[in-house]
Amino acid sequence: MVNYFYFFILLLLISCGPNPSEKTTAAIDIALTLLSKDECDEAIEVLEEAGYQSSNGIYLQVLASAYACKANFREVDFLLTDLAPMDTTNINTIFKSISIMSLSDESTVDSMEYISIGTGLSILLDSTSGAPSQQSREAKFGIRRAGDMGIQALILGLVNLGKFINLYGNAGPSGLKGGGSNSPANTCFMNYTDVTSAGTVTTGGVTGACTTATNGHPSLSRSTAVGRRRLCEGLVLFTNIIDILENLDISSNSQLSKLNDISSKVSPLRTMATAAGLGTLISMTSQSDCETAMATSSNLDKLEQFYVLIYEKGLL
């Protein structure tokens, strides 16, 4: 079946700005043709053989799409099947909807699909120096191209956030935390060791099924490097979504109107997190910066508080 998403991407590529080299242009054209036939690896190979183009937004978008293709991601499916019916009444309904999107079902930690979407997302987020931000992409690529990149990064971020919430929140078919098929079953995202965080978790009702501080997913452990890496992934998925929503105007795009609804419900969490003393974390968009910071026990305690505030209270 023809993947119409890539024709959508092709339309986005027709914009103002300097033309890429003929070699890169040819590689992009070939890659788009391959992607229209779902030949993902072949498209990646063609683009990488042309040489990585860190300053060419079109090249980066197509390469990101090629990696997303490996996870069976299609923009049209996301817009029609997942985004259109999403319940954006509040943060709880948003998290529930995200956890049961068509690609959210995850039974394996660090699955190929999760990694592929993450690779595509990283290509877009890490396209500038320093910590990722929509403003830095605008400064480098211009408002129009950065806007296209931001929308693509936002969508890929939501897809992987759905996978993250589904797996580590053990979300069932209806999006109920702890209602999934994880073995051993967990009712919290992580085990909480900080007294303040643990006390918040065990407060009746505010965190849904998570009523004990020691029934978290074993793969989100603060005591191992790989566990901290995954914990940081949960942080930067969320913070980059906030950054894009707060700095990208999508009000004129009717297809993406639900994203504005998400923005109005999610952005206030930055204020709430800052008031709770988590201002540095809620503004941290770099995976490497997070992993470096988590070498400090006090920062790990704050990360626990972030998980309570955002994930435990978000998915009930």
Image (cartoon, rainbow, N blue to C red):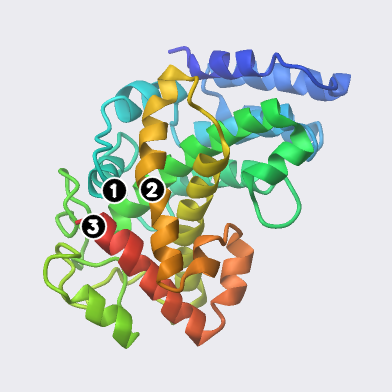
Circle 2 SS class: helix
Q: Nearer the viewer, mark 2 or mark 3?
A: 2
Answer with the quarter of the image where residue 141 lies.
top right
User: Does 216 sit left or right of 58 as displayed?
Assistant: left
Badge 2: how crowded within 10 Å, few (<14), some, or many (20+)? Answer: many
Q: Which residue is mark 2?
A: 266
Q: Quadrant of residue 87?
A: top left
Residue 297 versus residue 63 in the image, above or below:
below
Q: Position of residue 38 (x, y in %)?
A: 51, 22
- Whole-angstrom CA distance, mark 2 to mark 3, is 22 Å
Please tell me which residue is depicted at 26% across the width and 80% down the height of the picture: 198
| Residue of label 3 | 170
What secondary structure is marked by label 1? helix
Q: Is residue 239 above or below residue 101?
A: below
According to the picture, the residue beneath numbered tag 1 turns out to be: 91
Q: Is residue 81 left or right of residue 253?
A: left
In the image, is residue 259 above or below residue 288? above
Which residue is at a point 45% across and 71% down the rendered structure image? 227
For the residues labelled 1 and 2, the Cα–Cα distance comes to: 7 Å
Determine which of the numbered discs, if any, sits on residue 284 in the image.
none
Seen from the viewer's position, the closer of residues 163 and 32 is 163
Q: Residue at x 48, y 25 (%)?
A: 251
Of callouts 2 and 3, which one flags the residue occurring earlier in the amino acid sequence?
A: 3
User: Earlier along the polypeptide chain: callout 1 or callout 2?
Assistant: 1
Is the residue under label 2 in contact with that under label 1 (CB below 8 Å)? Answer: yes
